[in-house]
Amino acid sequence: MKIKPLVVDIKRNALDDGPGIRTLIFFKGCPLSCAWCQNPEAKSPTKELYFDRDKCIECEMCLTRCEQNAIDFEYEYRIHRNLCNLCGACINICPNDALKFVGKEYSIDELVKIILKDKVFFDNSNGGVTLSGGEPLYHIDYVHDLLIKLKKNKIHTCIETCGLYNQSEFNELILPYIDLIYFDLKIFNPELHAQYCQVSNQKILENFEDLIKKHKELLPRIPLIPNITDTPQNLTDLAKYLKSLNIKTIGLLPYNPLWISKSEKIGIRPMYNYSRWLNKDEKEKIKLIFSEFEFKDF
Ligand code: SF4
Ligand code: SF4
């Protein structure tokens, strides 16, 4: 049975993730499981309960409403997810919005209606829509239908992908309707990729190399994850690989440690812990590696 696509968030008036003013749509579900996932609430394709301890005033109202005994004030993550049936009773009673669901279903028409509210801003700024996640291609048929409607409305389309998708489906259903592709490359060594992302990078690299032949606007991006992707060995390997493919421009994605608290809010213990931002010196060292290979725009 196909999983219904859920949306984690819709961000309007965004100035990152593509040219101009954009609407970003974050889909839920991803075929990778990276140890440092910056959007952990978008990893699982199914709806989840999100608990924000900072908003909780410890009134215990939720406790009185939960018929599954899933709420436990002694438990570090508050909710025993294996007992919770997502009934929503605790959300409805919480006086301070400390609980909410992550993952909402939208029909294509509902999404397009929201997107079209900003059409005038897209047109005046050369902006458009960016599909992100999670992995938007996890829901390839839905994304295909959405893209067709966006192109009918003459909207610029961008996709952010982890690169793990069925190549022939992508080329038929997605490629004709996409103007710009942000393609994440994380770890060059296949064994390390499998260790940290739970899948080999072989198909990802095959898809990337196929895309280059399609002459679409394509930007490879490397997330800078301390001690995992940002090692001199990995960055040099990636730089050499991209150079060999005649790539001239890359994007470097800064590390954001806030993912750790987001993981805890959906009851997941982080598999990796690095709780600070990269400092200026560290960023400069990284940039130097790519400057030596004469890349632009990172
Ligand atoms: S969603 Fe329902 S089952 Fe889950 S914790 Fe809340 S009240 Fe309990
Ligand atoms: S109802 Fe909301 S504010 Fe009250 S204890 Fe539960 S989560 Fe905290």
Image (spheres, rainbow, N blue to C red):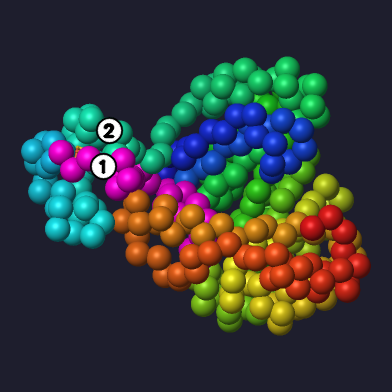
Q: Are marks 1 and 2 in contact (CB under 8 Å)?
A: yes
Q: Main secondary structure of the magenta part?
A: loop
Residue 287 location (% of width, % of height): 79, 67
- Beta carbon of the mark 1 residue lies under 8 A of ligand 2: yes
- Label 2 residue SS: loop
Which residue is depicted at the point 60% across and 67% down? Answer: 225
Q: Which residue is mark 1?
A: 56
Q: Nearer the N terminus, badge 1 or badge 2?
A: 1
Which quadrant of the frame does ligand 2 lie within? top left
Specify whether residue 152 is in view: yes
* Residue 69 vertical position relative to residue 147 in the rendered view, above or below: below
Quarter in which the C terminus is drawn: bottom right
Which residues are the magenta region?
31-59
Which is more toward the observer, 229 or 94?
Answer: 94
Q: Residue furthest front?
A: 280
- Beta carbon of the mark 2 residue lies under 8 A of ligand 2: yes
Which is more toward the observer, 264 or 207?
Answer: 264
Residue 39 location (% of width, % of height): 50, 52
Please name the amino acid that badge 2 sits on: Asn
Q: Which residue is mark 2?
A: 96
State yes or no: residue 126 in magenta. Answer: no
